[in-house]
């Protein structure tokens, strides 16, 4: 299935049904009177996060969503039925923005979460509402109110615990394929990964979700290469795994390049916990390893881990380091929720 993480769609809620003009006409009843029913309310437009979706590809082929008009009122004081709602089903992690693509409407982070995007118009009053002592046979009714319409943006940000960042060919996809059941495309040329991939990692009887995004290069924030449009998929992560390839001549410069792109993108990525690893170390001898590890340590301010997805060297150490940060973050969130629960009681 093709990956799509942004789409613009048109929504319109249903118009309200018109009220009815009607009079009682039963035989042998001396006094009739107005009995026109009200129109039904128009359908609403909802967005709902559902399980089983991980892309917005459905919204490439359908961009217009309209709820149904309310049923018109009828005689014998019968009120029209409410119009059928229109429901936009989206993956968990989808954000809804107004037409300017900057004003956030809602953020759906849990399965089953719903939000009303547009309310249907009210139904019109039937002629029974206009009966009075001076007007006992009103011959007018209200039309239904029109629905609401708008263009909105759907923007998907994958929900993962850990995110992989680095230059193209830093070994990110190979690492993801090694530690999860994901099958990303792997090849010996830049920008093999063209869209984010997710995988579930299991270590020491615990699990977490890892996201791999296309590689960054210098100037990505200005649109160079694939640009930084996919960085949104690691905004929600608790920790970043920054891979620097051992094939790089100057690993310190490479590390600073990626950190510069993260800072240019913003959204708090540079404030996230980070684990730095020198990947593809199976290509180096001991002396070259020590030299490049020292250079990278000077750039990032701590000793980087050594990693080889091909031989499995250091893989478990990296996963345990990620799991520790993720578990600590989960514990802090649970403690915060427990405090909130106590205050609410």
Image (cartoon, rainbow, N blue to C red):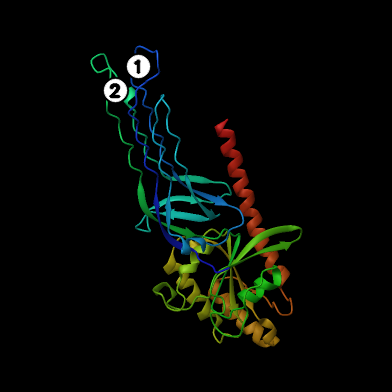
- The tag earlier along the polypeptide, 1 or 2, is 1
Q: Residue at x 60, y 48 (%)?
A: 333
**Circle 1 SS class:** loop
- Give the x, y percent position of residue 83: 44, 40
Which residue is label 2 attached to?
A: 130
Q: Secondary structure at mark 2?
A: helix
Q: Taking 98 as reference, is 48 left or right?
A: right
Residue 61 drawn above or below residue 11: below
Residue displayed at 45% across by 74% down: 227
Mark 2 Cα shell of 10 Å, populated few (<14), some (14-19), many (≥20): some
* Residue closest to the far front: 27
Q: Nearer the viewer, residue 216 or 328?
A: 216
Q: Is residue 100 above or below residue 225?
A: above
Q: Nearer the viewer, residue 342 or 111?
A: 111
Front: mark 1 or 2: 1
Q: Left of 57 or right of it: where is 335?
A: right
Residue 92, position in %: x, y?
Answer: 56, 54
Q: Please tell me which residue lies in front, 322 or 57.
A: 57
According to the picture, the residue beneath numbered tag 1 turns out to be: 32
Residue 321 vs residue 50: left or right?
right
């Amino acid at each position: 299935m093709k990956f799509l993480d942004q789409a613009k769609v048109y929504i319109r809620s249903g118009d309200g049904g018109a009220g009815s003009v009607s009079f009682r006409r039963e035989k042998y009843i001396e006094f009739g009177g107005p009995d026109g029913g009200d129109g039904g309310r128009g359908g609403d437009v909802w967005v709902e996060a559902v399980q089983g979706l991980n892309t917005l590809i459905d919204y490439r082929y359908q961009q217009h969503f309209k709820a149904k008009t309310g049923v018109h009122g009828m005689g014998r004081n019968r009120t029209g039925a409410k119009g059928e709602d229109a429901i936009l089903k989206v993956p968990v992690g989808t954000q809804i923005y107004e037409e300017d693509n900057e004003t956030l409407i809602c953020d759906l982070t849990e399965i089953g979460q719903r939000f009303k995007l547009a309310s249907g118009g009210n139904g019109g009053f039937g002629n029974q509402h206009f009966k009075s002592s001076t007007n006992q046979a009103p011959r007018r009714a209200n039309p239904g109110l029109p629905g609401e319409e708008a263009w909105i943006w759907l923007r998907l940000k994958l929900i993962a615990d850990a995110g992989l960042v680095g230059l193209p060919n830093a070994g990110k996809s190979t690492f993801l394929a090694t530690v999860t059941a994901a099958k990303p495309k792997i090849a010996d040329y830049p920008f093999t990964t063209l869209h984010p991939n997710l995988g579930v990692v299991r270590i020491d009887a615990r699990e977490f979700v890892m996201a791999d995004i296309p590689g960054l290069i210098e100037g990505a924030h200005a649109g160079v290469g694939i640009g930084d449009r996919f960085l949104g998929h690691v905004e929600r992560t608790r920790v970043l795994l920054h891979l620097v390839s051992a094939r790089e001549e100057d690993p310190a410069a490479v590390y600073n390049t990626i950190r510069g792109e993260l800072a240019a993108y913003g959204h708090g990525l540079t404030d996230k916990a980070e684990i730095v690893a020198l990947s593809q170390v199976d290509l180096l001898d001991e002396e070259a390893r020590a030299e490049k590890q020292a250079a990278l340590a000077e750039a990032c301010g701590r000793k980087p881990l050594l990693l080889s997805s091909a031989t499995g060297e250091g893989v478990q150490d990296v996963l345990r380091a990620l799991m520790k940060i993720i578990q600590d973050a989960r514990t802090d969130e649970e403690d915060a929720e427990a405090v909130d629960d106590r205050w609410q009681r």
